[in-house]
Amino acid sequence: MTSELNEQVQHLLIKQVTAGEEIGLQAAVYLDGVLVVDAWAGVADEATGRPVDGDTLFTSWSTTKGFVATCIHMLADRGQLDYDAPVASYWPEFGANGKAGVTVRHALTHRAGVPQMPANVTPEMMTDWDAMCAAIASQEPLWEPGTKTGYHAWTFGWILGELVRRISGRSIAQFAEEELCRPLGITDFYLGIPDAVEPRVATLRQDPQHLANTENSTGLNRAVIPPHVSTAAVVNRPDFRRASIPGGGGIMNARAIARHYAMLANDGSLDGVCILSPGRVDLIRALQTDEHDEVFGGPACKGMGYFLGGDPARGGNATMGPAEGAFGHGGNGGSMGFADPERRLVLGLTKNYMRAPVEGQPGVAQLVADLVRGYLDADHE
């Protein structure tokens, strides 16, 4: 581990906590397939004062989607899935009410047209896999599939997760554990935690502005991210933590996120373990669309299930940096995972304070990423 860089990141995390900007958080960085930063600070549970350590687990919202997308690519890599085949060819019920033409590629790039949650959704319903899949399969698309892109904040997970189940015969939780995490030695990624790890899970808190933004959303945003099922209070529930909710309910630590992306940054292999065949990573991180996102309200550069780096004015993710080939996925409130294969750089960041973004003010994941890039640019590589 690069002690100087680790100390710099550690100091940044402590400074954020001390200033009241964060409650508890972790950062893990790989460079050239080696873990060079493993840092944490703050508390996991404000009520008890339990401190964060490297093993603390965080509900990391849509950072989960990166793992789900990789599972889909593993199936494609094995010839079991075609990106341009209809979702309904694997899951016939999904083709109802105008969705027969929705392809797997549409689902990966948020072009399927069904970002909206079922009108009758409840937190309890979200923990019922079959009920959610049936409800989403029966929905009508909000636009002709393939003609627009709009972030499928929650539904992305059930659409792609059910594809994994229909093709592999295993739940997305089981497939991710057996085929992705276990071979890579990732022990701390969960789509539904066992009771034994509950004491390690951090409690999330939303700042008042973040909560108000969620509760006061309107129009399409409210349909896509319904306030009554999309708050810290909901995802902190024991039943929610134990359910498989692959659009935004994954529980993990920074080490798990970073190790997943370290494999992707190394063309699909890590420490002698091959997860994706050579060249697959270049395919999945290629730009698919940078169109106006109907949910975000601006351009967003998307690959195959991941967001991309590049110029923020053109839809690139600022945390991933200026490299258009960098790719990954962030989560509601500021968690993040990404790979920059050209720099052989990977970052995983988890946190438990969900803060509303401030225009022009970088979040802590970007602060860490910028620090690391600056360190590398100063000839420390």
Image (tube, rainbow, N blue to C red):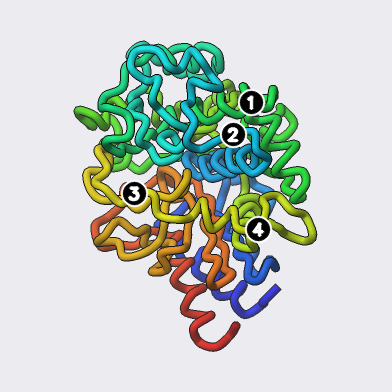
**Three-letter residue code for mark 3:** Thr
> In the shown orientation, is residue 22 left or right of residue 376?
left
Residue 316 can be seen in this image: yes
Q: Position of residue 310 (x, y in %)?
A: 36, 64
Q: Which mark is residue 289?
A: 3
**Three-letter residue code for mark 1:** Ile
Label 1 sits on a secondary structure element that is: helix
Label 4 sits on a secondary structure element that is: loop
**Three-letter residue code for mark 4:** Pro
Residue occupying the point 55% across, 35% down: 82
C-alpha span from label 4 to label 1: 23 Å
Which quarter of the picture shows residue 210?
top left
Mark 1 vs mark 2: which is more N-terminal? Answer: 2
Label 3 sits on a secondary structure element that is: loop
The residue beneath circle 1 is 167
Mark 3 vs mark 4: which is more N-terminal? Answer: 4
- Report the quarter where the C terminus lies: bottom right
Q: Position of residue 77 (x, y in %)?
A: 64, 44
> In the shown orientation, is residue 237 left or right of residue 307?
right
**Above or below, 102 relative to 64:** above
Q: Which mark is residue 221?
A: none
The residue beneath circle 4 is 278
